[in-house]
Amino acid sequence: MKVFKLIFRNALRHKLRTSLTILGITIAIIAFGLLRTVVTIWDSTVDATMANRLVTRQSVSFIFPLPFSYKDKIETIDGVKNVSGAAWFQGVYKDKSNFFARVAVDDNYFEVYPELVLSKQDFENYKKQRNACVVGSQIAKQYNFKIGDQIVLDGDIFPGRWEFEVRGIYQPKNKNTDATQMLFHIDYLNERMIAETPARANQVMWYMVQIKDPNRSAQISNQIDALFKNSTAETKTETEKAFTQGFVSASGAIITAMNWMSFMIIGIILLVVANTMIMSARERTREYAVFKTLGFSALHLTGLILGESMLIACLGGGIGLFLTFPIVSGFEQAMPKGFFPFFFIEPITIVLAVTATLMVGFLSAIFPIQRALGTKIVDGFRFVG
């Protein structure tokens, strides 16, 4: 008990220095948690993909369309379970800052994406109405969308005024399932294209292909592409994960930099705490000599120095972790709406922050312990500092 009492007294001997050290650790842990959350959430968009889904797109670029007729041909390939066509709509809802995914899909889309949980009644109501749409629960909450509400979009990729009625709100099956999409009938889009821009009618931007055996993904991908080889619209088929990684890789350098920066912060914490402990050990050289004279063992001295280092590190780390949750929540609110389809602190971030705190507390005490144990009693009494 006396050792623990000495640890607390030593830690609070220089209140300003200790407070600033704890503040530095707190800020560093918050920065670490925020950066790691951005990195892990970005990576989660890839992890949310399914192994039994392929994406077939135009071989030149994702922005070029594919004919409706491709769907029937893809369905004839052995091992294909379901095919769904989709087109990125974009458009503006009230203001350009209101960003969320707006995608035209066929009815098979909800079978290919079972993680988008929609009630049977809502799905039936959605199928009955041509201009019906289904929205994710997150944007329904964000924009206060309810069943029966009208959503008016100003088209850009597909120009004009587009009116939709909310007939369903889907729930995400998992935490990393995107709940920020607005989905509507691709037939509604196509009918208007036939009337207004016939050259753009009967087209999709990509096909989602659900397969029976994920182990055959490469074989089926090659078969699909072989069907349309030397056609006017050749295809490139890849796993959904590879397709998603293609989008994420565009920001890969930034994400990699953030990842490295988050771990560099741990090094900064180590330097801050180590500096504090070295200063403390230097100031107490004569005290340690007195302790040795009174019979304090090497174990006692180790406990005093290590305990003080761990106490300071854990106080800073604990406060930092406590504040990380509301700060991450505030960061999510401050980001442009729909920028992150989901945003939450993953358990691995907490584990890494706790591990880093304990590691910093331990490593920062090594040099002061060596100095205290290695200094002879006589040299300790002679020390002036």
Image (cartoon, rainbow, N blue to C red):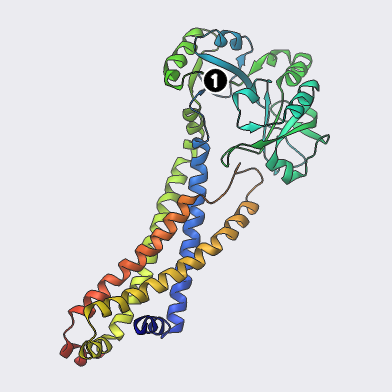
Residue lying at 58% horizontally and 42% vertically, measured from the top left? 175
Q: Is residue 168 left or right of residue 247?
A: right
Residue 142 place in picture, x, y as percent: 72, 46
Q: Residue furthest front?
A: 1
Q: In which quadrant of the rendered view does residue 150 lie?
A: top right
Image quadrant for the C terminus? bottom left
Tell me if residue 278 comes above or below residue 324 in the rendering: below
Residue lying at 48% horizontally and 13% vertically, measured from the top left? 225
Residue lying at 43% horizontally and 60% vertically, measured from the top left? 354
Tell me if residue 215 comes above or below residue 290 in the rendering: above
Tell me if residue 13 comes above or below residue 188 in the rendering: below
Instruction: Answer yes or no: is residue 96 visible.
Output: no
Image quadrant for the N terminus? bottom left
Residue lying at 73% horizontally and 45% vertically, measured from the top left? 141
Instruction: Answer yes or no: is residue 115 visible.
Output: yes
Residue 2 place in picture, x, y as percent: 36, 85
Residue 46 place in picture, x, y as percent: 50, 36
Q: Pick the residue in front: 23 or 148.
A: 148
- Count of numbered badges drawn on the protein: 1
Q: How many other residues sit within 10 Å of disc 1, few (<14), some (14-19) or many (≥20)?
A: many
Name the amino acid type tagged 1: Gln
Q: Secondary structure at mark 1?
A: strand
Q: Pick the residue in front: 229 or 269.
A: 269
Tell me if residue 138 comes above or below residue 322 in the rendering: above
Q: Is residue 90 left or right of residue 360?
A: right
Residue 22 place in picture, x, y as percent: 46, 73
Mark 1 = which residue?
210
